[in-house]
Image (spheres, helix red, strand yellow):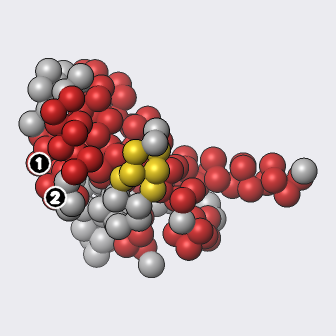
Amino acid sequence: NQACLSQWWDAPFKADSKQYPTAEHYMMAQKARLFGDEDAYAKTLLAKKPAEVKEIGRTVRNFEPGIWDANKYRIVVEGNYHKFNADKAIRDYLLATKQRVLVEASPVDKIWGIGLAADDERVHNPSAWQGENLLGYALMEVRDLLLKEQAGLQNN
């Protein structure tokens, strides 16, 4: 179901020879690496729960908002690409969304989400969103990448 689109969905995958339990783990590990915080990076690899890894991400040393802003979207696209590529069931779910606009319907997240709850009538009107919906856009980009790969395989 749609819960598999969450960064916190338990969908283990491997990337760069490391195992990540969730896309949130990947995101925070890459955040730590981006800023050269090897301690935080090691902790993210050992963390069991996404909430735990999110807290670790908040403590990354040498953090610079401008650098993070320039890299965070790419990192989330990469993590979700690995996540959906590693699990056929959730990949099929994502691909079945076809060309639908995907949103993180969260009233408290104005960066990764739309800043609105799923039951808010404005959810269907992008000009009324209160947030950037970066997770939704990242998921749609991953979906497009997977569709292109699938089309390439079918043409060979």
Along the viewing direction, whichever of 121 and 111 lies nearer the viewer: 111
Measuring from the top left, give residue 155's x and y in whole percent.
89, 52
Residue that carries the numbered disc 1 in the rendered image: 55
Q: Is residue 49 above or below residue 59?
A: below
Helix, strand or loop at label 2? It is helix
At 32% from the left and 43% from the top, the residue drawn is: 27
Do the residues under discs 2 and 1 have CB atoms within 8 angstroms?
yes
Q: Residues within 10 Å of mark 2 (few under 14, many from 20)?
A: few
Residue type of the residue flagged with mark 1: Glu
Q: Where is the N terminus found, in terms of image quarters? A: bottom left
Instruction: State left or right for residue 92 relative to residue 115.
Output: right
Name the residue at the bottom extreme.
Answer: 1
Res 134 quadrant in image:
top left
Q: In the drawing, does residue 107 fall left or right of residue 20?
A: left
- Position of residue 107 measured from the top left corner of the image (x, y, whole percent): 20, 61
Residue identified by numbered label 2: 51
Distance, label 2 to label 1, CA atoms, is: 6 Å
Q: Above or below — where is 59 with respect to 151?
A: above
